[in-house]
Amino acid sequence: MLEVKALPLAELRQRTSEKWREYPEDVLPLFVAETDFPLAPAITTALQRALDAGDTGYVASRTPLATAYAAFAERRFGWHVDPARMRSTADVSMGIVEILRRVTQPGEGVIVMPPVYPPFYDLVEEAGADVIRVPLLDTGAGWELDHSGIRTALEDGARAVLLCSPHNPTGTVHSRAALEQLAELVEEFDAVVVSDEIHAPLAQPDAGFTPFLAVSEAARRVGFAVVSASKAFNLAGLKCALMVADDDRTHAVLRELPIEVVWRTGQFGLLAAVAAFSEESDAWLDGLLRTLDENRVLVQDLLARHLPGARYRVPEAGYLAWIDLRALEWGDNPARRILREARVALHDGAAFGAEGTGYARLNFGTSPEILAEAIERIAALVRR
Ligand SMILES: Cc1ncc(COP(=O)(O)O)c(C=O)c1O
């Protein structure tokens, strides 16, 4: 296992991505889902080689990407999937839209489960479908799929479920049993599941993550997965994702996508993803998971010590902390006050759906020093 530590703030400020350019220098940016770690060495090598060779043309028609992902899925999740049944595209969002466009008719319903990654609402609309909200159930100890709400939505005509697995922003890893039940339900109504598994490589080893298509025969028949190396390996700007099917009918949908969808894949994204999915990067990913495990607990300790009014459940995957700040009585959008007065940028909870009102999302894919400074700055508002 490699030690994966975040870069110092002064180096991070040299970056020109959204995380580092949206706000002035006195703001600690913990909003957008980019991470502050150096690249995995195999990725740097692959990109450097391409730069040296001027290898910046279009992605080739035949590439090792699908085979690399299939090997990664087998090693990391024990999921055996056929590389011939995958298609690449620029990003996960585009993969979701392209699939939804083809499995729904204009105006048909697609179920989303708030609080959820805010662009889901726009992606469903971009595909010409209508958003049907079936919120996750807050059990008091965690969040669960609302199977009975999903059944009602399917009875009312919804044709697809847009699943976030693991779930952003709560970091929930849905149990295999819950996903099995979802697959049966969806098959009963001859609908489909599009499973966004962008955070899957970041599921903690003890969380029991199961890829949707690996859950059961029914899931394999009704499911599409959209996957990417971009969250775990911080490659979002390079543009590469994979759509995965594992059944003749769903594979036909991917096979019939216009070739332009595949051509939108970024050449650097593809080269970086092949390196990320290679066995050589496993030790780096294990090191990252260890660091995120420490950080998710550190957030809990820092909140308990400095901001006891905040409620937070340690996530099972990813680097996003979903924090309930309602007890502090900072209004519907506490992130606004935190930005203005504490100079820390969080993501506004209400953007994830009405269920997120009074919440904020904090990105802990950074150093312990930055996390401590951010939470101390926020806590200082309470003491004022
Ligand atoms: C659940 C989820 N899906 C999709 C995306 C966006 O992925 P992409 O940049 O590949 O479209 C994100 C980004 O944070 C995400 O959290």
Image: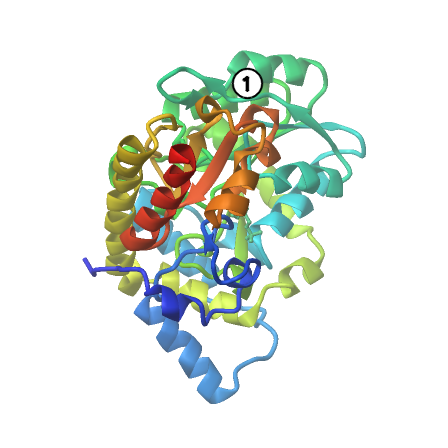
Along the horizontal axis of the image, is 160 left or right of 164?
right
Q: Position of residue 157 (x, y in %)?
A: 72, 19
Label 1 is placed on what type of residue? Leu
Residue that appears at 41% across and 41% down: 378
Q: How many marks?
A: 1
Decide if ligand 1 comes within 8 Å of the CB at mark 1. Answer: no
Along the horizontal axis of the image, is 363 left or right of 252?
left
Question: Seen from this angle, which residue lies furthest front?
Answer: 384
Up-down relation of residue 274 to residue 127 (above or below) = below
- How did the renderer colour the structure? rainbow
> Crowdedness of circle 1 by 10 Å Cα count: few (<14), some, many (20+)?
many
Question: Seen from this angle, which residue lies furthest right?
Answer: 106
Residue that appears at 44% across and 63% down: 273
Helix or strand or loop: what does disc 1 sit on?
helix
Q: Position of residue 147 (x, y in %)?
A: 52, 16
Q: Position of residue 64 (x, y in %)?
A: 45, 66
The answer, for residue 80, to whether it is visible in the render is no
Residue that appears at 36% across and 77% down: 45
Q: Pick the residue in front: 357 or 234.
A: 357
Q: Pick the residue in front: 347 or 4.
A: 347
Quadrant location, the C terminus = top left
Along the horizontal axis of the image, is 263 left or right of 220?
right
The answer, for residue 3, to whether it is visible in the render is yes
Question: Seen from this angle, which residue lies furthest bottom?
Answer: 53
Quadrant location, the N terminus = bottom left
Q: Pick the residue in front: 204 or 38.
A: 38
Up-down relation of residue 308 to residue 166 (above or below) = above
Q: Pick the residue in front: 235 or 80.
A: 235
From the image, tell me which residue sits under label 1.
185
Residue that appears at 63% across and 19% down: 189
Q: Position of residue 362 (x, y in %)?
A: 43, 42
